[in-house]
Image: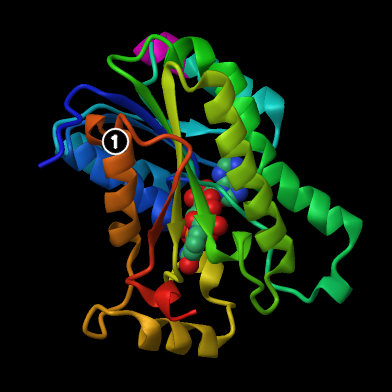
Amino acid sequence: MTDLNGKVCLVTGASRGIGRASALRLAGAGADVAVNYLTSQGAAREVAEEIRQMGRQAAVVKADVSEPDDVQAMVEFLGTRFGRLDVLVSNVASGGFRSLMDTTPQHLQAAMSTNVTPLLTLVQAARPLLERAEGRAKVVAMSSHGSHRALPAYGTIGTTKAALESLVRHLALELGGRINFNIVLAGLVETDSTRSAPPEAFERARAAMMVDGRPLTAADVADAVVFLASAASDLIQGQTLIVDGGASLRG
Ligand SMILES: NC(=O)c1ccc[n+]([C@@H]2O[C@H](COP(=O)([O-])OP(=O)(O)OC[C@H]3O[C@@H](n4cnc5c(N)ncnc54)[C@H](OP(=O)(O)O)[C@@H]3O)[C@@H](O)[C@H]2O)c1
């Protein structure tokens, strides 16, 4: 089993969905975890409580990651509380499903501010803490097939995911000497954010997967996060790990 004993992790958007699953899986592997949330305080506290029941430390941190001042304050809190950061999982995204013809510049800018810019502001603010990591520090960003494919009603988010993946590779180029930057690219997982996805998208994804008909879950994605957070991935740099049950092999 992957050993993250004593590692300090921050997962953004950890109150629900894939972020929540990642926080719990990291703690299950032995890590102490800071659970970031924006509006779901009760859910974030429940995640932290589950982590504590595993015998790990947990902190609950409210911060809007699209606000650089919030990011700075969150990182300062982590510095005071933990003194270093071994793993940063930049998981938050928003944007909504809509046609590009109904998308305003404000929609696109808002999605960039939530889905792309936080990775940069987080890494800039947390760099001193990441450089105090035990072993190599790990940064993991969360992407989707919209980064490289065209999906119905997904133009805004897909555009931001393409930018996010490029940002990861360029961060690796600048800071890769001390920190690993990688991407987990998830297939379609049922979470609050995908409940409004076209229903046929789930049917298509499930039919294309090669896992005996079982759905892709947030925990499956979180397992890839744990791998990229661990020393087992020390030599993996600037890469995208696709977790979709093989669905994308079918085109
Ligand atoms: N679900 C999928 O099928 C899928 C597929 C591929 C990639 N992904 C990616 O996986 C990531 C997580 O998606 P998800 O489906 O798990 O989302 P989700 O269930 O909707 O959860 C979103 C999380 O982000 C938090 N959040 C939203 N805006 C925030 C902000 N400005 N500052 C801080 N926290 C904020 C929410 O916190 P509060 O509730 O506290 O506000 C919540 O914890 C995203 O990057 C998404 O693009 C998802």
Residue ID for mark 1: 233
- Measuring 49% from the left and 49% from the top, which residue is drawn there? 142
Q: Nearer the viewer, residue 15 or 175?
A: 175
Say if residue 38 shows up in the picture.
no
Give whichever of 99, 49 is nearer the camera.
99
Could you tell me if residue 228 is visible in this image? yes
Picture coordinates of residue 223, whole percent (x, y): 27, 51
Establish if 198 lies above or below 15. below
- Main secondary structure type of the part rendered in magenta: helix
Residues rendered magenta in the picture: 78-83
Q: Is residue 66 magenta?
A: no
Residue 37, image x and y in percent? 51, 42
| Extreme residue in the left direction | 1
Magenta region includes residue 82: yes
Amino acid type shown at disc 1: Ser
What's the residue at 46%, 87% (across, down)? 204
Q: Does 17 sit above or below residue 240?
A: below
Quarter of image, res 81: top left
The residue located at (17%, 32%) in the rendering is 30
| Horizontal relation, residue 117 to residue 243: left or right | right
* Front residue of 222 and 136: 136
Q: Which corner quadrant holds the N terminus? A: top left
User: In the image, is 100 to the left or to the right of 132?
Assistant: right
